[in-house]
Image (cartoon, rainbow, N blue to C red):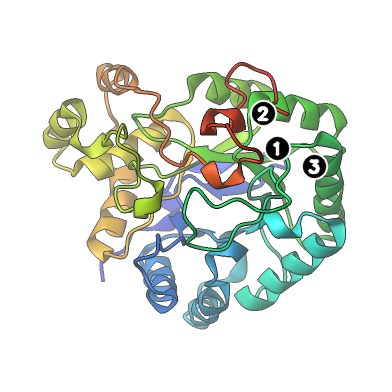
Amino acid sequence: MNNIDPSLIPQRTLASGAKMPAIGYGTFGSDYASDELVANCVFENALMGYRHFDCASVYGNEDKIGLAFKKIFESGIKREELFVTSKVWNNAHSPKDLAASCRKSLKDLQLDYLDMYLVHWPFPNFHPPKCDVASRSDDSKPYIHEAYMETWGAMEKLYDEGLVRHIGTSNMTIAKLELLLRDAKVKPFVNEMELHPHFQQPKLYDYLKKVGIEIIGFSPVGSPARPERDRTSDDTCDIEDPVMIEIAAKHGIHPATLCIKWAVQLGHTAIPFSTKAKNSFANLHCLTTEALTDAEMKRIASIDKNCRLIKGQVFLWKDGQNWEDLWDENGVIAK
């Protein structure tokens, strides 16, 4: 198997001073990859040179990934060489449930601590895995800041106890983050968010950079294998964009690989998912080759279509809403 020296991979410096690899391996199988296959990819990718793994309780595969981590450590890779993230799901936002969920993730992953722990979504609204986008929880609620701060307080307690080395947010907006930063004792170290060339979120991106929160981008190649339920007729495809195809050809890489190279050079951390070793290797290898030119970066900046793919419809809380209400696009938190 080809491999890349992990020391060649760019690193992000968190507010704590800790280093986080600027590329991670996502572990959501998008409904088409079995838990065992994802876990095997985690093991193979660690041997390939990946050191950052993005997990979550709701993915339902952390117990299998734990077996992969055990094999990774047996291979000679040390625990401190890895950066492992997990996330608490929406049905465990209460302090008691959150602590229990974290401990279960640790047990399943066979780890003593997590490098990063995230609140997966700012909404407590539960829905079963693989449900239709029209599904709604009977007790769905809007974002309630007082409730979120109880959740964040439980995150801070885990941080104080050392079970998690860092805590962060995911799928947040500027309006929600402003309230969190006002009231939090421990500022989030990262925010995880959808980011790809057709959805660059420049306003939120610049805000996070300004306040010193590192950015992790999911769906970095536009999630071409995302579940059918997450697709809408007006979605666009990053890897079919003529600009991406042209620049990728110039560098001798696939447009999907170019998405990763662009993301890391722009300044955030990408967490691609693929079950094909050649793709995972290409994503890692491209970070060790010649950088994109300023002109190429500007051309990619120009193709932003504001095309959100993971819209979050299942988290809506009342009839007559559309998904934009989740994202505070007018700067006001919807009630």
The amino acid at mark 1 is Ala
Mark 2 or 3: the one toward you? 3
Residue at left offset 60%, top offset 16%: 330
The image position of residue 46, as x and y in percent, is 43, 67
Whether the residues at callouts 2 and 1 have beta carbons within 8 Å, the answer is: yes
Residue at left offset 26%, top offset 18%: 299
Q: Is residue 208 left or right of residue 8?
A: right
Residue at left offset 61%, top offset 44%: 315
Which residue matches tag 1? 15
On the question of residue 113 being in view, the answer is yes
Nearest the viewer among 83 and 241 is 241
Q: Say few, some or many: other residues with alpha carbon within 10 Å of mark 1 (under 14 / 14 to 19 / 20 or more).
A: some
Which residue matches tag 2? 212
Q: Is residue 182 left or right of residue 270?
A: right
Which residue matches tag 3? 148
The image position of residue 250, as x and y in percent, is 12, 32
The amino acid at mark 2 is Gly
The amino acid at mark 3 is Tyr
Nearest the viewer among 107 and 125 is 125
Task: State which quadrant residue 259 falls in.
Answer: top left
Q: Say few, some or many: other residues with alpha carbon within 10 Å of mark 3 (under 14 / 14 to 19 / 20 or more).
A: some
Distance from the alpha carbon under mark 2 to that under mark 3: 21 Å
| Kind of element beneath mark 2 | loop
**Which of disc 1 and disc 3 is earlier in sequence?**
1
| Kind of element beneath mark 3 | helix
Nearest the viewer among 74 and 44 is 44
Q: Say few, some or many: other residues with alpha carbon within 10 Å of mark 2 (under 14 / 14 to 19 / 20 or more).
A: some
